[in-house]
Image (tube, helix red, strand yellow):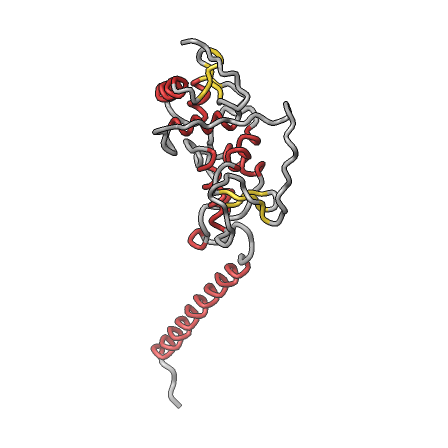
């Protein structure tokens, strides 16, 4: 019988240690896999690479800064990708940095979106018309269809009970998205309210000099009213046509 030598012991020990290291590595890998499996379905644990576009809770303080109401609402709905109420849109765009001078911003947003062809009412909430390609829409009317609800009948008009409605005379060279167009949009959203140049500049996120120049031209052309020096108001069907002298 051969007597084991020290070298033979060393060879066996080295082999067992190598197998031990492999088993330790396999155990660590299994532990990591177990930890990852336990995180599946837990909110907020998905890796950043697996997350979709900007989530609603990730809207920053300047996400909608410098935008018009319509553009901010369109971007917000595009982020959340589902219909939202007027209250939810107002809260989101204000927290995202949209500046305005409206005394009733909820009413202003509802009025602005109702005049835009890109928005549609879906069971009391706002959606984007591009989400509903099968919906027929009359391009000649600005009325917004309500999906899932029959159209409301118009009550008989009574003298003195109609809400003020902004009058839009021929605007000539006023192009969509220009400062003049944005000013008319802001004034039309609150036709009974007067605004000064600073308030309107803040509402459309433009410089005061450009706003005052545009307001002066709109007033000179009879498109807006100036009840008193430095104050401007939308021209409505029942507006007093007299304005303050320069």
Residue at the top extreme of this rendering: 245
Left or right of residue 129, residue 214 in this image: left
Left or right of residue 90, residue 172 in this image: left
Query: Is 151 or 199 nearer to us in this picture?
Result: 151
Does 111 appear above or below 118? above
Query: Is 143 or 140 nearer to us in this picture?
Result: 140
Query: Which quadrant, please, contains the C terminus?
Result: top left
* Spot occupied by residue 140 in the image (x, y as percentages of width and height): 47, 41
Q: Residue at x 39, y 75 (%)?
A: 15
Q: Residue at x 35, y 21 (%)?
A: 210
Left or right of residue 85, residue 46 in this image: left
Query: Is 101 or 135 nearer to us in this picture?
Result: 135
Query: Which quadrant, please, contains the N terminus?
Result: bottom left
Q: Residue at x 51, y 28 (%)?
A: 189
Q: Residue at x 61, y 44 (%)?
A: 151
Does 175 appear above or below 126? above
* Spot occupied by residue 175 in the image (x, y as percentages of width and height): 36, 32
Query: Is 15 or 202 nearer to us in this picture?
Result: 202
Left or right of residue 6, residue 96 in this image: right
* Spot occupied by residue 203 in the image (x, y as percentages of width and height): 45, 26
* Spot occupied by residue 211 in the image (x, y as percentages of width and height): 38, 21
The part of the image, by quadrant, that contains residue 111 is: top right
């Amino acid at each position: 019988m051969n007597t084991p030598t020290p070298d033979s012991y060393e060879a066996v020990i080295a082999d067992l240690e190598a197998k031990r290291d492999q088993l330790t590595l396999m155990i660590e890998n299994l532990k990591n896999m177990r930890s990852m499996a336990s995180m599946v379905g837990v909110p907020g644990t998905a890796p950043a690479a697996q997350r979709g576009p900007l989530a609603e809770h990730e809207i920053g303080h300047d996400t909608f800064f410098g935008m018009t109401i319509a553009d901010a609402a369109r971007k917000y709905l595009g982020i959340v990708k589902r219909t939202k109420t007027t209250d939810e849109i107002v809260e989101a765009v204000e927290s995202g940095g949209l500046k305005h001078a409206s005394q009733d911003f909820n009413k202003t947003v509802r009025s602005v979106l109702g005049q835009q062809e890109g928005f549609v009412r879906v069971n009391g909430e706002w959606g984007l018309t591009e989400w509903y390609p099968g919906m027929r829409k009359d391009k000649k009317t600005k009325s917004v269809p309500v999906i899932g609800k029959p159209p409301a009948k118009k009550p008989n008009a009574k003298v003195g009970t109609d809400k003020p409605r902004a009058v839009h005379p021929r605007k000539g060279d006023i192009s969509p998205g220009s400062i003049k167009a944005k000013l008319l949009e802001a004034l039309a959203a609150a036709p009974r309210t007067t605004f000064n140049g600073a308030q309107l500049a803040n509402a459309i996120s433009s410089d005061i000099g450009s706003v005052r120049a545009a307001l002066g031209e709109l007033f000179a052309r009879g498109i807006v009213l100036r009840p008193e020096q430095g104050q401007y108001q939308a021209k409505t069907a029942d507006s007093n046509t007299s304005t303050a002298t320069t």
